Image: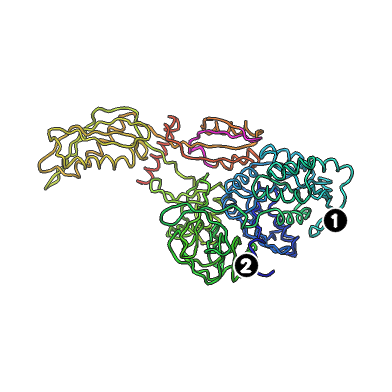
């Protein structure tokens, strides 16, 4: 194929719930178009998109994979995305840069949680949605039930354009309700089929679905609606095709295609449908951004002759290649050797080599045009969410907003001196996967890694070892408890007096301690009158109190929400010093704190759990067992949304437990809510453990 034209490009993201057959659909598309000569198998580790060691070992997609093919004078860019919710960040970044979402739905299971998530991302980024009902060759396939569910969730503009014949183990044919023909496939060939008349026993169903499709199309276009009524409730095939294409591009119609990807049934007709009905990059949703410097909102229209604008949506570190940045050309074109401005980092980057990717295979390009997807290596300082432009066009594309982390673990090096290697490795892994976060928490003395689930973090740790040669221990992260008081102490005294030759030390203070409202922090009040403590020593008293609050007297956790007043004391003309008053302030605070009904506070998180209705009881029971409190429930079709508050200490491994009790169909979100008093029986254990740690450290 010669130089590609933007109008000939179709950008597709394949997404959906885990196990719906996304990777095999991608494999079928490559095979049926002659892009590959062998149909890869997940169990053999031979698929084009799942090529990394961890994907082959686990037999699931972990990374998004960019694929491309040429067919019928068109170029199809495809991103195959993971279905496991631990890797949902890859799905979101792919949705950001593609024009059409092929949402794969398992015909046995129907609409699942992953279906909801991916459709939500497609809506968020304003891209077209095509439902691909797959696995119709399975014995328990329920195509009609799946269609009913899709309509229940997404409205009556879910439009069936195909339905299966001989559903189940003998599935081999599809009725096309646009052409009103039956397409009979030869199993396991390159999706070859013959057109036949619709059998008599299926004509009524075909006519009913055809009429429904005509009505859906006519509803969305005033001109077609007039033609519909003039023709007595029908449209010509030409008008139907035009109206359907227009409705899909305007995101008003959600067509449904049916396939058995594993047997290549329906794959070729899916490709034809995408080429004929789905938008090219010049017709797709317009990207938005801001002008660099003043933040003015701008629309980035896809123009083939405009300034080059590239948006980086993925980075990957490949052996023997280095860091590879994947991008979409939003406007203009780019050529190898071109210098572009990184608008986010104010750096000039040179595109030394541009590649077209097909899994791990790459082909060098001299030029890449508007709407195309490419990759470039060895950029100096460019990362995910960065915009590269010509020097005269200063605009930054709106960034992908990645989901917040759901689980955390703590790391310690197995070998001394590996701290720097660990930090460098984690930094590179974060660049590849922005949903993976890490930080060193000085309060807890731990390196905390956070992600979307236990499997997500397991994969990260494996990559840390394989790519960067670092072994680590993984432990449960400590909980950032807080200490405070419930009672008020009117006066607590401490006199620091020491004489050991030369100048002595003398500091004498009286403090009042009282609790503040939750979240108000700390307040220090100087109530000294008559100069009983010189003003120059008061800041030292406050400093002593603040330092004592860093590790509280109860269990060495930070103290919060306390008001301290220094109201009386005394000093010595010679022996008083700032140090003496700092020590006196700290000791008086510790003494008074333990007399003022001290308590521990724990972080409480709000969680929102989305599960199928049949798992409601088990999920709510599990939340209660974690000291959780249910705060509300909503329904979303057949899914239930449970809202609750749960102590962070009881959320460890919750993602794994939720998947276990919901057969992988439950998901949750969490965010910090507030601090709350720890129950006494729990508090006693925490204080005892803190005391043991303190004794062990002192030994």
Q: Quadrant of the N terminus?
A: bottom right
Q: Nearer the viewer, residue 162 or 441?
A: 162
Residue at 63% from the left image edge and 52% from the top image edge: 82
Note whether residue 327 is visible: no
Give the secondary structure at mark 1.
strand
Residue annotated with mark 1: 194
State which mark lies toward you, 2 or 1.
Answer: 1
Judged left or right of residue 267, residue 674 is left
Return the residue found at the far right: 200
Residue at 55% from the left image edge and 58% from the top image edge: 314
Magenta stretch holds residue 638: yes
Q: Earlier in the sequence, mark 2 or mark 1?
A: 1
What range is drawn magenta here?
635-652
Residue 691 lies in quadrant: top left
The local crowd at label 1, few if under 14, some if 14 to 19, many if 20 or more residues have their Cα within 10 Å, is few
Residue 512 lies in quadrant: top left
In the rendered view, tell whether residue 348 sits above or below residue 169.
below
What is the chief secondary structure element of the magenta stretch?
A: strand
Residue annotated with mark 2: 362
- The CA span between labels 2 and 1 is 35 Å
Residue at 29% from the left image edge and 40% from the top image edge: 548
């Amino acid at each position: 194929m010669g130089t590609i034209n933007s109008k000939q490009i179709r950008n597709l993201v394949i997404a959906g719930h885990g196990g719906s057959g996304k990777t095999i659909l991608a494999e079928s598309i490559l095979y049926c178009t002659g892009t590959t000569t062998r149909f890869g198998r997940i169990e053999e580790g031979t698929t084009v998109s799942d090529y990394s060691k961890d994907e082959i070992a686990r037999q699931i997609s972990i990374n998004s994979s960019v694929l491309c093919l040429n067919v019928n004078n068109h170029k199809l860019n495809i991103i195959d995305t993971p279905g496991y919710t631990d890797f949902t960040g890859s799905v979101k970044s792919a949705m950001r840069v593609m024009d059409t979402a092929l949402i794969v739905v398992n015909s046995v299971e129907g609409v699942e949680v992953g279906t909801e998530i991916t459709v939500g991302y497609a809506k968020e980024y304003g891209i077209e949605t095509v439902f691909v009902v797959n696995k119709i060759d399975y014995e328990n396939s329920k195509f009609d039930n799946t269609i009913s569910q899709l309509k229940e969730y997404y409205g009556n503009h879910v439009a069936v354009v195909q339905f299966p014949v001989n559903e189940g183990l003998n599935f081999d044919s599809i009725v096309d309700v646009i052409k009103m023909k039956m397409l009979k496939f030869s199993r396991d060939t390159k999706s070859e089929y013959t057109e036949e008349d619709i059998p008599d026993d299926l004509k009524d169903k075909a006519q009913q679905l055809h009429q429904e499709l005509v009505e859906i199309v006519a509803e969305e276009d005033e001109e077609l609606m007039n033609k519909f009524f003039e023709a007595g409730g029908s449209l010509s095939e030409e008008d139907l095709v035009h109206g359907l294409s227009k409705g899909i591009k305007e995101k008003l119609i959600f067509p449904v295609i049916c396939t058995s990807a594993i047997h290549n049934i329906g794959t070729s007709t899916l490709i034809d449908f995408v080429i004929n009905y789905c938008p090219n990059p010049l017709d797709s949703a317009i990207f938005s951004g801001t002008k660099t410097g003043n933040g003015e909102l701008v629309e980035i229209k896809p123009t083939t002759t405009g300034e080059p604008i590239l948006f980086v949506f993925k980075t990957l570190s490949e052996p023997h290649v280095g860091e590879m940045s994947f991008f979409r050309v939003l406007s203009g074109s780019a050529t190898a050797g071109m210098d572009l401005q990184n608008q986010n980092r104010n750096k000039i980057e040179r595109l030394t080599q541009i590649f077209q990717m097909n899994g791990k295979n790459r082909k060098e390009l001299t030029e890449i045009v508007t709407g195309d997807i490419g990759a470039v290596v060895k950029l100096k300082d460019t990362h995910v969410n960065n915009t590269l432009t010509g020097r005269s066009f200063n605009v930054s594309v709106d960034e992908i907003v990645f989901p917040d982390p759901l689980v955390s673990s703590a790391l310690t090096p197995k070998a001394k001196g590996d701290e720097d290697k660990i930090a460098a490795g984690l930094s590179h892994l974060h660049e590849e996967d922005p949903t993976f976060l890490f930080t060193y928490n000085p309060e807890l003395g731990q390196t905390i890694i956070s992600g979307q689930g236990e499997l997500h973090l397991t994969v990260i740790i494996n990559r840390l070892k394989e790519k960067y040669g670092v072994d680590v221990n993984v432990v449960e992260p400590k909980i950032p408890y807080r200490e405070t008081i419930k009672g008020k102490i009117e006066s607590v005294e401490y006199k620091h007096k020491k004489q050991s030759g030369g100048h002595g030390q003398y500091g004498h203070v009286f403090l009042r301690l009282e609790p503040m409202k939750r979240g108000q922090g700390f307040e220090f009040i100087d109530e000294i009158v008559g100069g009983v403590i010189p003003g120059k020593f008061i800041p030292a008293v406050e400093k002593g109190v603040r330092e004592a609050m860093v590790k509280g007297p109860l269990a060495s956790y930070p103290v919060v929400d306390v008001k301290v007043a220094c109201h009386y004391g005394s000093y010595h003309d010679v022996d008083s010093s700032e140090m003496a008053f700092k020590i006196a302030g700290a000791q008086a605070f510790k003494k008074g704190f333990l007399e003022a009904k001290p308590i521990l506070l724990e972080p409480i998180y709000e969680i929102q759990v989305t599960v199928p209705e049949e798992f409601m009881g088990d999920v709510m029971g599990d939340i209660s067992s974690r000291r959780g409190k249910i705060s509300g429930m909503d329904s979303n079709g057949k899914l239930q949304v449970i809202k609750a508050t749960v102590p962070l200490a009881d959320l460890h491994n919750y993602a794994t437990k939720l998947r276990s009790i919901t057969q992988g169909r439950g998901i949750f979100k969490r965010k910090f809510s507030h601090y709350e008093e720890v129950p006494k029986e729990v508090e006693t254990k925490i204080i005892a453990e803190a005391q043991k740690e303190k004794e062990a450290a002192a030994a």
